[in-house]
Amino acid sequence: MSRNQHVVPYDGRWAVRAEGNIKVRSVHESRKDAINAARNCISSREYGVIVHGRDGKIRDKMSNNNLFPPRF
């Protein structure tokens, strides 16, 4: 079951954590790498990626629709 994926600060790096979970799914050196990893965890249009800043506050929300824009 896919859920919203949160990109959160983690010991000076960035982690991906599924919504409602305490454990992190993966840890990355950059926020960009963590966002890309979070995108790969989403399988349904009803879920998205929620990116937090270093202060832990939500900085950006991306739905599955705008994560993978259609190619023309």
Image: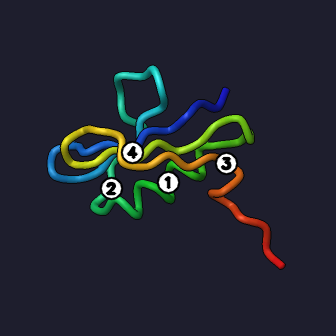
Q: Position of residue 55 (x, y in %)?
A: 19, 42
Residue under circle 2?
28
Mark pair 2, 4: CA separation: 10 Å
Mark pair 2, 3: CA separation: 21 Å
Q: Is residue 2 left or right of residue 55?
A: right
Mark pair 3, 1: CA separation: 13 Å
Residue under circle 3?
64
Q: Is residue 44 left or right of residue 29?
A: right
Disc assigned to residue 37 = 1
Q: Which comes sooner in the sequence, label 3 or label 1?
A: 1
Mark pair 3, 4: CA separation: 15 Å
Mark 4, Cα crowd under 10 Å, few <14 / some 14-19 / many 20+, is: many
Mark pair 1, 2: CA separation: 9 Å
Q: Which comes sooner in the sequence, label 2 or label 4?
A: 4
Q: Which comes sooner in the sequence, label 2 or label 3?
A: 2
Front one among 17 and 51:
51
Q: Position of residue 30 (x, y in %)?
A: 31, 62
**Viewer can see residue 49:** yes
Cβ atoms under marks 3 and 4 closer than 8 Å: no
Circle 4 SS class:
strand
Q: Is the C terminus in the top left, top right, bottom left or bottom right quadrant?
A: bottom right
Cβ atoms under marks 2 and 3 closer than 8 Å: no
Amino acid type indicated by mark 1: Ala
Q: Is residue 25 left or right of residue 45?
A: left
Q: Which comes sooner in the sequence, label 3 or label 4?
A: 4
Circle 2 SS class:
strand
Amino acid type indicated by mark 2: His
Would you place residue 12 above or below residue 33 in this image? Answer: above
Residue under circle 4?
7
Mark 3, Cα crowd under 10 Å, few <14 / some 14-19 / many 20+, is: some
Q: Is residue 32 left or right of residue 46?
A: left
